[in-house]
Image (cartoon, rainbow, N blue to C red):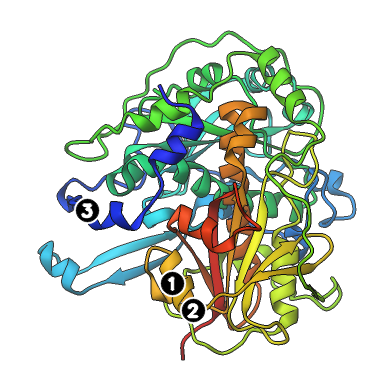
Amino acid sequence: MVDAREYHERTKHTPRELRGSDFRLDRSNKPRPYKIYEDLARFVPPTSVDPPDEPVLSALAQRRPEPMCGPDDPGDAGDPDVYTLCHFATGVTKELEREGEIMEALEQDRETVRFRAASCTGKLYHVDLYAVTGECGAFDPGVYHFDPHAGGFDVLREGDYRGVLAEAAGNHGGVATAPVTFVATSEWWRNAWKYRARTYRHAFWDSGTILANLLAVAHAAGRRASVVAGFADDPVTGLLGVDPEEEAPLELVPVGSGAPVPDAPSIDPIDPAEAPLSEAPVDYPLVPDAWRQSTLPDGDAVRAWRERGDGADLGTSAPGDGERVELDPVDAATASARPVGATIERRGSLREFGHDPVSERKFATILDRALRGVPTDLARGRGLLDCYCLVHAVEGVDPGAYRYHPGANVLERIGETDRETAGRLALDQPVVGDAAANVYLLTDVERVVEHLGNRGYRLAQLEGGVALGRLYLATYAHLGLGGRGFTFYDDLVTDHLSPRAAGRTPMTMFAFGKAET
């Protein structure tokens, strides 16, 4: 049995660990990046997806559940559009034909690669989205699994089970009145095939990018939406019919508001048959063990957990006395008007960066819109994360290492850096040093776990994942810019940012800039 601090230490990347590893990918055993239920009814919505017209930068700039943009009177818009929300959170948004040496090695001429709405480590797409609805537009009350590959919904249960989630969430107000609550899960093997024990980290990184999209689309449509990290886990696994040794719930996202949900009905066990993901799945016990050690037993425990986190920025540190650089993000009137749906469809993962500088205002706007904080169920301050930037090519900002202070829109200079060092920190990937800027999100894992237990570690990683997803969207809202998430040597990052970041460790990292021409 491991607690989150031990798990984090055991899954850190180090140069020695990677040099000494003899692990090789078994491509013949690669899991399918989506699940197939073999005997469930299928529901295909009668309408196509219909994303809101609201600019993505307006939709991102929210740290509260209540929408600050979108329709003036969302009550006139009907129920939340479940299909549109699912599609732009985790649906297939583009397809490309891939050829080359890899395909020759597999004795195939070409392969159609399907890209999803949100980024995912290794494009392995191990996070699934379920919708638990009442009467909601075209959806009858039920429990549905979204199939991004086919664009339809598998019907797991018929009837209104929203009360199960409300009770599991300690009667959280958002869940208790939402027409639909989404549940994000991770099917471990689909990511562990490549990343092994680090999959538990990736579960929250990758669900975070999906939830960043989901929140943006919901808020753009004028819907109330938040991330609920505190809930009793066993009732949710029972409702979905999943085995946590293989697939486990990560977060709840209630969308919209309405009448109180009905009381929780009894849950009859279900065990829907799934087609095997690959020929010989491999177990990595550390992953479900880490998840299990972070579970909460019931609604009373959930409420007590939330009370422990109220009013404190547990993972963050106070400003220092470094030189200040004032940033000037654009206002709403002059910001990019690219709508949320078009931005999600445009999003990519930039492979090569040029060295041309990014304008200070675009740099400032990306940080400002993406890093204002995540609407979660803990009534705290800004969150669990500190933001640090390695600046290489931003007009008006000297190259160097900085702490970024959201809200104040200020960079605090903490030291020197260079492109070679930046690439070294990011698993010796020189492309990271080519970017205009690298954004690291760090937290104090020891302090977070001390106050919020192992569940707090989930939340810290999740906040890093949502920030990563928002950085993607804020970057791709701007013509000519692109970005990509990367992994890193954990302790080398801390060392490079110290003494300012002493005692803190990175959760996620994003590099952005102009494309190589």
Residue assigned mark 1: 423
What is the three-letter code of the residue carrying label 2? Arg
Residue 331 shown left or right of residue 46 in the figure? right
Instruction: Give the residue type at disc 3.
Output: Gly
Query: SS for tag 2?
Result: helix
Distance between the alpha carbons at the discs numbered 1 and 2: 6 Å
The CA span between labels 1 and 3 is 20 Å
Classed neighbour count for the residue bearing mark 1: other residues with Cα under 10 Å, few (<14), some (14–19), many (≥20): some
Q: Is residue 303 visible?
A: yes
- The quadrant of the picture occupied by the N terminus is top left
Q: Residue at x 46, y 91 (%)?
A: 517
- Horizontally, residue 452 falls left or right of residue 73, namely left
Q: Write down the residue under mark 2.
A: 419
How many angstroms separate mark 3 from mark 2 (CA)?
26 Å
Q: Nearer the viewer, residue 508 or 125?
A: 508
Residue under circle 3?
A: 20
